[in-house]
Amino acid sequence: MPPLEAAGPRDQLIPGDLTPGEPLPLDVFDRKGVMLLARGQIVRSERQLERLLEIGLWGDAAEVAALRDRPIAVEAGESERQQVSVFEQLSALRRDLAPVLADTGPGLADGIRQITARLRRAVALDANAAIASIQWLRTAPYAIRQSINVAVLSEVVLDGQEADIAIRESAVAAALSMNVCIVELQEVLYHVKDMMPEQKSAVARHPQCAVERLRAAGVEDIPWLRAVAEHHEAHDGSGYPRKLAGSAIGLPAQVISVADKFCATIAERAYRTAVPVSVALRRLLTASGPTMDPLVAARLAREIGIYPPGTVVKLRSGDIGVAVKRTLDPNCPVVRVVLGKDGLIAPGFTKRLTSREMFAVVEEVPADALPPGFDVLTLWHPSLDRGDSPETA
């Protein structure tokens, strides 16, 4: 039987038209009009849907128009903003993690498990917003936000590699708890460049200390404990505490290690400013040295992009905007324009595909290139997607 083809005019589908995990409300075609997916079929994940939209999906023009006119479903008692705010969820996790890590009893294990589940739900809701939070949610103490940020990237990278759910859960739990023995010391080191001998000794001991504390709290998850024990091992065998090398280090620990280094590089310190995100990623890929598996570093860069969501960039058009969504090309994020080339705030924060030459990213620019007091987090508000059209996207 020949493939089914569209009978009438078609319109290209854009982000926001379809919802992962829900039955498709219309038949979906490729650019030639050949049916790819039938009404009622389900695209299971956000990442799968993103990839399909990047390749190109079309639907009957009238049905696509009806999709864009439909109201956004909101649960009773919740505003649209409350329902979708990944940033609010991750801010709450930053508040909740500190007392969990301070627990010296069984509450430590239960607390980490609960925060792991909440964090993974937030990333599943909007991974792009979760990645952006790494640059824009900076109010929590450094030790806490570093653990949350590494956990977010670990989930994103392992999800992109289609790792088993149990492994992802263990990796996120490990990222959240890996520094449980040095939370206070991390805050001290945030303000100083050089460590004292006793501080170096505490840092060297902290992986094994964390494992012992987690076991005392009732943790029996071997992948979780192994990732904590190995998160400072190095690809070339120069790490600690066991001098493991190469494949002897588990994948969760390797992912956590790369994410930890990246997040530490782009975070400010009392004695230095933050390294620009695109610079940090390029260093990761070209000058990371033998301590990291280059394939794992490349996985991180591929999953979040060279200009990850949250990065402020200048476009060839002269506009200043913020990367809000990853694409299949790590160099070409979707950007929402904040300032036009005339220096005025752009109405509607028009979405630009930077894969188009005229809107290509020229460079990353400092956050202070945005208007003073501008709330970057509003760029992920779902109403903006509803207002987009294929012509502006």
Image (tube, grey):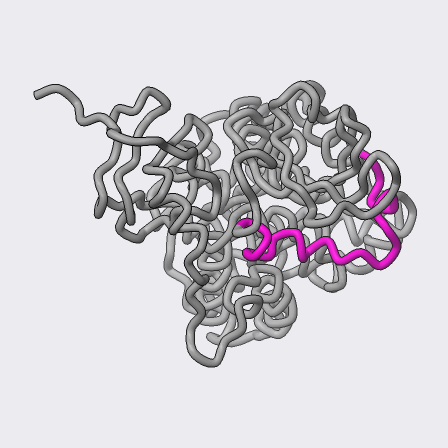
Q: Locate residue 33 relative to residue 47 in the image: left or right.
A: left
Depth check, front residue: 209 or 336 = 336
Q: Where is residue 303 in the image (x, y as percent from the top left)?
A: 53, 34
Q: Locate residue 154 relative to residue 218 in the image: left or right.
A: right
Depth check, front residue: 55 or 327 = 55
Q: Where is residue 13 in the image (x, y as percent from the top left)?
A: 42, 38
Q: Locate residue 65 relative to residue 180 in the image: left or right.
A: left
Q: Is residue 265 magenta?
A: no
Instruction: Determine which quarter of the picture holds residue 381.
Output: bottom right
Q: Position of residue 275 (x, y in %)?
A: 81, 37
Q: Does the magenta stretch include residue 377?
A: yes
Residue at the right extreme of this rendering: 271
The residue lying at 58 percent from left, 36 percent from top is 393
The residue lying at 45 percent from left, 40 percent from top is 158
Q: Position of residue 221 (x, y in %)?
A: 38, 56
Instruction: Determine which quarter of the picture holds residue 233.
Output: top right
Q: Is residue 216 above or below residue 134?
A: below
Q: Is residue 349 visible?
A: yes
Residue at the bottom extreme of this rendering: 77
The residue lying at 82 percent from left, 42 percent from top is 274
Which quarter of the image is occupied by the N terminus?
top left
Q: Give the range drawn in magenta.
A: 365-385
The residue lying at 43 percent from left, 33 percent from top is 12
- Number of numbered discs overlaid on the protein picture: 0
Instruction: Determine which quarter of the picture holds residue 392.
Output: top right
Depth check, front residue: 264 or 67 = 67
Depth check, front residue: 44 or 380 = 380
Q: Can residue 245 be seen in this view?
A: no
Q: Is residue 75 above or below residue 358?
A: below
